[in-house]
Every structure is written in C-alpha cells, then in structure tokens.
Image (cartoon, grey):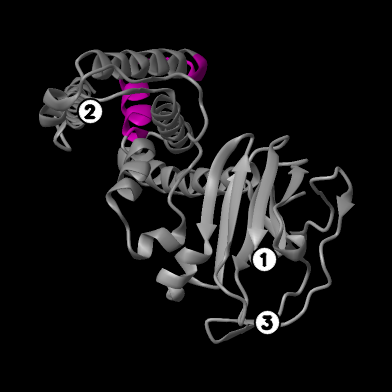
Amino acid sequence: MPKQRKIIYAITAIYTILILYFLFFAFGRTGAAERTTGYTFIFIPDDFYKMPAISDLLHPSLMDFVGFGNLAAFIPFGILIPLLYRISFVRFITLFFLGIVLMETIQALTLLGSFDINDALKNSLGAAIGFGAYKLGFRSKNLWRNMATTAISGLVLFIGVWGLCGLADKALTKEEGPFVAINEWTDSSGVTSAGITPYSFIINGQNVNPRYNMFGSEAGKKEKFTYTSKEEMIFILNYGIPEPADDSGSIRVSVDGREILTSSGEDQLNYPELFPAMFEMPVEAGSELVISMEGNEIIWDVGYRKMQYFWE
C-alpha cells in the first residue's frame, strides 16, 4: 500500500502540474497577457452547461476541445484525491471549487486569462463525475478490477452528464418560432392601419407576390407606422420600389429612436442586385418600432419570429 500510495502521489503531482501548465501557459496565454489592458471577471453563471453537440464532433473546433476539456480534464482529480485522502463528497467538491476559483482569480490578476465562474462550475462538475466513478469503482480489493470499473463508470457518468448538459442547453436556449405577420400598425394620424391590399409586382425583373401584408405611403406622401413589440423577437420586413415607378422614395426604420435601416430609390438604382431586399434584426420586448416611408417605396410581409424556448 505505501508503494501504491507513492505512485498515486506521483501521478497526482504530475497531472496537477500538467493542468496548471494549460491554465497559465498554454494557448498563447503569455503573449496574450502582454496585449491585455484590463482584468476580466465573469461572476454570473450563464453557459456552464454548454457542451459541444455530437454534430460538432464531425468538424471540431478549438472551442469544442476547450468545452470538453473544461469538463473531462478534471475528472481524474475526483478519482485521485479520494484515493489519497478519506473525504466526503461535500467537503471534496467544496474545497475543489474554492481551489478552482483561486486559480481563476490568479489567471485574471496575472492577465493570463479571465475569471469565469462558468469554467469553475464546469471544472467542478468534471471532478464530481470522477468522485462518482471512484465511489462506483473502488468496491473490492482487486486493484485492476477497481480501475476497470472506475474507468467504465467514469465514461458512463461523463456521457450521462454530457446528455443532461445538452438537454439543459436545449431547454434554456431560445430559438426562433414561426413567422407572425404584423397587420396592425399605428399610422401618422394615430389610426390603426392594416396597410394596402397586397398585389403582385416586379422589382428588377423579379416577380414578387406578398403573402401577408403590404404598406406604402399614400400618393407618395410621407407616412410613418409605429408598432410596440410585446415580446423578444426577430423583426422582419421586405422593401423596394416596384416597376415601372421611378426611383423616388425612401425608407427608414428605427427602434426606440435609434435608426437601424435607411434606404432610398437611389440605393436601388445603384445596387439593383440587392433588391428586392429583406431586413431582419433582433428586437427586445417593449421596444417601439417606427417605419418612415415616402415616395414609391413599399414594404411587404412585415412581421416577426418570436424568440421562445422549445417547450413554449
């Protein structure tokens, strides 16, 4: 046993040195420190459960390896430390988490990285997997059987946690819902407007058939449409000047007073390959959308895709 203990000590020391090297010196950290001008501290956990999906492994990127490494690289500590010291899970994971937090702090203060609570949580989750594998594996006096059972248990637990992380990511990530047409805008006179009856037209030789709605300025005059978003969404509209009308016209779109789109007939004349054009952008709930138009400019199929969780 003393000999085995010395071997475990040596393995733990070597592995710890290797992890410290990756934490402080690998991935060009020393060169990056010379270019870094300030500290980075991330205290709010938001994506510690994010892991590369199976499809990502077909063409893995460096960040995919980092995502796996933040979890898998710390599994051995959950096995080695209980082999050296009799310790409960609560005490082990608490001390381990505090140790990782200390390493993250040193990374940030030395400008060799950032303090990221998400990394600390993912590292600790890896150590917890190792501790669980140790508890499941070391149940007999046969060392080799224990090691084999621990390795299999660790792999099964890792795959299980990976799957749970994927489910958590799916459940907590908003996705674009189906398209919803906005058919009620407030016009310049304060009246609710459903726009004009959609009709087919041609822009730069392309046939356009609006499916949901169409808005334009009456007799080429200036018109303004206002809409307040009720939920987080991706706002979408199509715009252009139909043939054979001349190129006089313009459109401006703003969100809460900030202009996010401006276009004119001159743009369409100079860059015909861009028209008919589609515009889309994310909009927060409660934002005021304002569309200002004049001349022959029209918009159609105006609406949004609600950002929602898959279970909504």
Location of residue 190 in the rendering, given as x and y in whole percent from the top left corner:
86, 42
Numbered circle sitting on residue 298: 1
Residue occupying the point 57% across, 74% down: 246
The Cα atoms of the two marked residues, 1 and 3, are separated by 11 Å
* Pointer 3 with pointer 2, Cβ within 8 A: no
Residue occupying the point 68% across, 82% down: 201
Please name which of the two marks, 1 or 2, marks the residue nearer to the observer. 1
Q: Give the range drawn in magenta.
A: 74-90
Q: Is residue 94 above or below residue 310?
A: above
Q: Is residue 227 above or below residue 96?
A: below
Residue occupying the point 51% across, 38% down: 49
Location of residue 36 in the rendering, given as x and y in whole percent from the top left corner:
20, 24
Q: What element carries label 3?
A: strand
User: Observer-nearest residue: 22 or 93?
Assistant: 22
- Say few, some or many: other residues with alpha carbon within 10 Å of mark 2 (under 14 / 14 to 19 / 20 or more): some
Please name which of the two marks, 3 or 2, marks the residue nearer to the observer. 3
Q: What element carries label 1?
A: strand
Q: What residue type is labelled 3?
A: Phe
Location of residue 66 in the rendering, given as x and y in whole percent from the top left corner:
31, 42
User: Observer-nearest residue: 51 or 247?
Assistant: 247
Q: Name the residue under label 2.
A: 23
The Cα atoms of the two marked residues, 3 and 2, are separated by 61 Å
Q: Mark 3 points at which residue?
A: 201
The Cα atoms of the two marked residues, 1 and 2, are separated by 56 Å
Q: Residue lying farthest right?
A: 191
**Do we see residue 239 in this rendering?**
yes
- Say few, some or many: other residues with alpha carbon within 10 Å of mark 3 (under 14 / 14 to 19 / 20 or more): some
Looking at the rendered image, the quarter that the N terminus falls into is top left
Residue occupying the point 49% across, 43% down: 157
Location of residue 278 in the rendering, given as x and y in whole percent from the top left corner:
57, 65
Q: Is 307 displayed left or right of 32 in the figure?
A: right
